[in-house]
């Protein structure tokens, strides 16, 4: 039904235009009584006497030839806030006028009910009510692109009128309206991850991801949910290892569980990712940090050793003894790793972070028997 009505509008406007050209010379301008019956927006949806900015409008009526001016003025705006409509008289006829909905804030445009005034060349004036609908907001870019916590960020976009709220990571924040195309906000104190910025207006809402400069790059090795440089499907166990399983339901999804059940045949055990491309760009072993979330699952006394392997085959070790149960994050600079599998060997220099291409998790065979290490979210923080 809507499509048929819209097509009829377009066809009738075109036909009437052709007829009016043929009959123009027969019109008596002094007897014209111009009138507008309805204004129809030829948008994706059929809107009667309403439309969005820049929608094409067909004003239907009688005696509409020789129109000189069309103006819009919001009913709530001052008298001087009149916005002229640019239209092509060639596209008009005695039965229809075609133009686009104007919106110019510098001239006083506002959303809501408008008084549309149409004047022909003989001074005849007709008026009609029309409602300009506010479009949903859009977000363009952030400036700076990666702000720090406590830093002001500018959000550019469109249709920021009648803003209800601005949120970051799901929590509302204070904001400043710079204009209808710019809003500023302060990145909340303590922010350590990027998140969506959501702007809600009277017309709808829009969200866009804001990356936050946290002072370092995050290099995710594995999260065992399919993410990272070494995902779960390429980890293997070796030596006196017990089981290596992947378990769902951890604090952040799937985690790995590695066990040593007391076998000492080889005198060593472990599980490891494959050795592919290097992981870290930053080269300072004092500022590049290794992090891993771990839990001993009740096996207090388990001694885990984490190994970083470089491209020359060097194995650098860091030891963590579990003295309590529950998930915890082990974090240390890579300079704390000892050379040649020995956490205490600090005399042989430091591993070059840019050469690290493999991570291993092992269990010391002189700790709790049996031992368990659950681990997740292996990553490096490369400070710059």
Image (cartoon, rainbow, N blue to C red):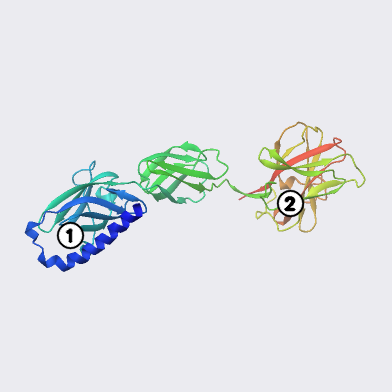
Q: Residues within 10 Å of mark 1 (few under 14, many from 20)?
A: many
Residue 236 falls left or right of residue 22: right
What residue does disc 1 label? Answer: 94
Q: Residue at x 73, y 55 (%)?
A: 357
Picture coordinates of residue 14, whole percent (x, y): 25, 63
Task: Give the secondary structure at mark 2.
Answer: helix
Q: Residue at x 19, y 58 (%)?
A: 95
Residue 212 falls left or right of residue 294: left
What residue does disc 2 label? Answer: 233
Q: Is residue 51 visible?
A: no
Q: Residue at x 67, y 41 (%)?
A: 253
How many numbered circles does the render carry?
2
Q: Is residue 306 visible?
A: yes
The residue furthest left is 30
Q: Earlier in the sequence, mark 2 or mark 1?
A: 1
Q: Residues within 10 Å of mark 2 (few under 14, many from 20)?
A: few
Q: Nearer the viewer, residue 334 or 277?
A: 277
Q: Residue at x 76, y 46 (%)?
A: 337
Picture coordinates of residue 374, whole percent (x, y): 75, 40
Is 332 located above or below residue 23 in the figure?
A: above
Residue 63 falls left or right of residue 188: left
Residue 60 - label: none
The residue furthest right is 265
Task: Give the secondary structure at mark 1.
Answer: loop
Is 302 located above or below residue 138 in the figure?
A: above
Q: Estimate the spatial distance between the alpha carbons at disc 2 and disc 1, rounded to whole Å.
A: 73 Å
Picture coordinates of residue 52, whole percent (x, y): 33, 50
Nearest to viewer (mark 2 / mark 1): 1
């Amino acid at each position: 039904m809507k499509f048929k009505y819209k097509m009829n509008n377009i066809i009738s406007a075109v036909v009437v235009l052709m007829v009016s050209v043929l009959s123009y010379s027969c019109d008596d301008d002094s007897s014209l009584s111009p009138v507008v019956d309805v204004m129809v927006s030829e948008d994706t949806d059929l809107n009667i006497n309403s439309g969005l900015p820049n929608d094409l409008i067909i004003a239907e009526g009688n005696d509409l030839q020789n129109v000189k001016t069309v103006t819009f003025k919001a009913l709530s705006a001052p008298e001087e806030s009149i916005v002229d409509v640019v239209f092509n008289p060639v596209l008009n006829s005695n039965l229809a006028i075609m133009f686009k909905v104007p919106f110019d804030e510098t001239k006083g445009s506002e959303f809501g009910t408008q008084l549309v005034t149409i004047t022909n060349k003989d001074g005849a004036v007709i008026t009609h009510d029309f409602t300009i609908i506010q479009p949903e907001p859009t977000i363009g870019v952030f400036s700076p692109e990666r702000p720090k916590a406590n830093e002001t960020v500018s959000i550019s976009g469109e249709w920021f009128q009648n803003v209800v709220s601005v949120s970051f990571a799901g929590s509302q924040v204070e904001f400043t309206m710079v204009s209808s195309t710019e809003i500023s906000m302060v990145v909340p104190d303590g922010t350590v991850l990027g998140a969506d910025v959501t702007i809600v207006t009277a017309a709808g809402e829009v969200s866009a991801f804001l990356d936050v400069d946290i002072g370092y790059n995050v290099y995710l090795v594995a999260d065992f949910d399919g993410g990272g440089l070494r995902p779960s499907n390429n980890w293997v166990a070796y030596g006196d290892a017990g089981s290596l399983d992947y378990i769902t339901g951890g604090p952040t999804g799937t985690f790995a569980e590695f066990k040593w059940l007391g076998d000492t045949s080889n005198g060593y055990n472990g599980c490891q990712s494959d050795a592919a491309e290097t992981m870290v760009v930053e080269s300072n072993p004092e500022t590049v940090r290794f992090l891993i979330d771990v839990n001993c699952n009740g096996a207090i006394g388990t001694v885990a050793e984490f190994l970083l392997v470089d491209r020359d085959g060097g194995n650098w070790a860091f030891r963590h003894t579990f003295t309590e149960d529950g998930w915890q994050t082990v974090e240390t600079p890579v300079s704390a790793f000892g050379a040649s599998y020995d956490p205490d060997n600090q005399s042989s220099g430091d591993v070059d972070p840019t050469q690290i291409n493999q991570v291993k998790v092992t269990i010391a065979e002189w700790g709790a028997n049996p031992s368990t290490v659950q681990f997740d979210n292996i990553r490096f923080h490369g400070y710059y």
